[in-house]
């Protein structure tokens, strides 16, 4: 299955996974702060999407476990929140020459000043 199809049509594609789990193995290749200053990165980022009761989906990564709040239409990003004032989105943007999936992960936090917004550019293995 192509990852862009997975993220742009999240809920129907999830039904295709036998165990209701999809793992996205990625690398953060660039990270940009809220002021637009970008720095090259090379660090792993792994995301687990787990089907819950009904049509609910849980996103698990690092020490975070959050319900997905949107991600089932043909144009929208995958969205979730890590708490009050926090907003996270992830969107597949296309394929690289080596058939990896390019993604953008944006986070913002209007609840506190100590966790500024950030945009990360990811390169992910297409889960087939």
Image (cartoon, rainbow, N blue to C red):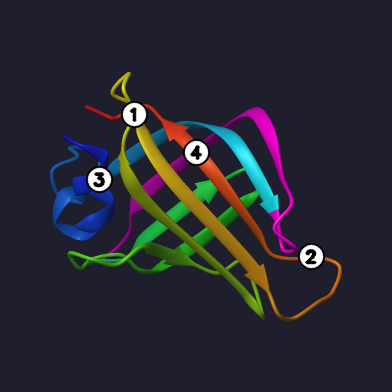
| Disc sitting over residue 50 in the figure | none
Q: Do the residues labelled 2 and 1 touch (CB within 8 Å)?
A: no
Residue tagged 3: 4
How far apart are the alpha carbons under marks 2 and 4?
Answer: 20 Å
- How many neighbours does mark 4 have within 10 angstroms: few (below 14), some (14-19), or many (20 or more)? many
Residue plotted at (64% across, 28% down): 43
Q: Which quarter of the image is occupied by the N terminus?
A: top left
- For residue 39: magenta? yes
Decide which of tag 2 and tag 3 comes sooner along the chain: 3
Dot 3 falls on a residue whose secondary structure is: helix
* Residue 96 screen position, x and y as percent: 34, 29
Dot 1 falls on a residue whose secondary structure is: loop
| Disc sitting over residue 96 in the figure | 1
* Residue 31 screen position, x and y as percent: 66, 44
- For residue 77: magenta? no
Query: From which residue to which does the magenta span run?
Result: 33-54
* Residue 73 screen position, x and y as percent: 20, 68
Q: Main secondary structure of the magenta part?
A: strand
Residue tagged 2: 115
How far apart are the alpha carbons under marks 4 and 3?
Answer: 13 Å
Decide which of tag 4 and tag 1 comes sooner along the chain: 1
């Amino acid at each position: 299955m192509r990852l862009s199809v997975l993220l742009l049509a999240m809920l129907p594609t999830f039904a295709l996974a036998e165990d209701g789990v999809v793992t996205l193995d990625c690398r953060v290749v660039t990270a940009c702060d809220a002021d637009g200053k970008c720095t090259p990165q090379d660090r792993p980022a792994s995301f687990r999407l787990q089907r819950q009761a009904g049509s609910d989906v849980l996103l698990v990564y690092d020490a975070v476990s959050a319900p997905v709040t949107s991600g089932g239409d043909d144009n929208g990003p995958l969205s979730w929140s890590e708490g009050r004032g926090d907003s996270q989105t992830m969107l597949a943007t296309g394929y690289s020459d080596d058939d990896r999936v390019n993604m953008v992960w944006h986070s913002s936090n209007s609840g506190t000043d100590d966790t500024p917004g950030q945009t990360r550019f990811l390169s992910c293995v297409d889960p087939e």
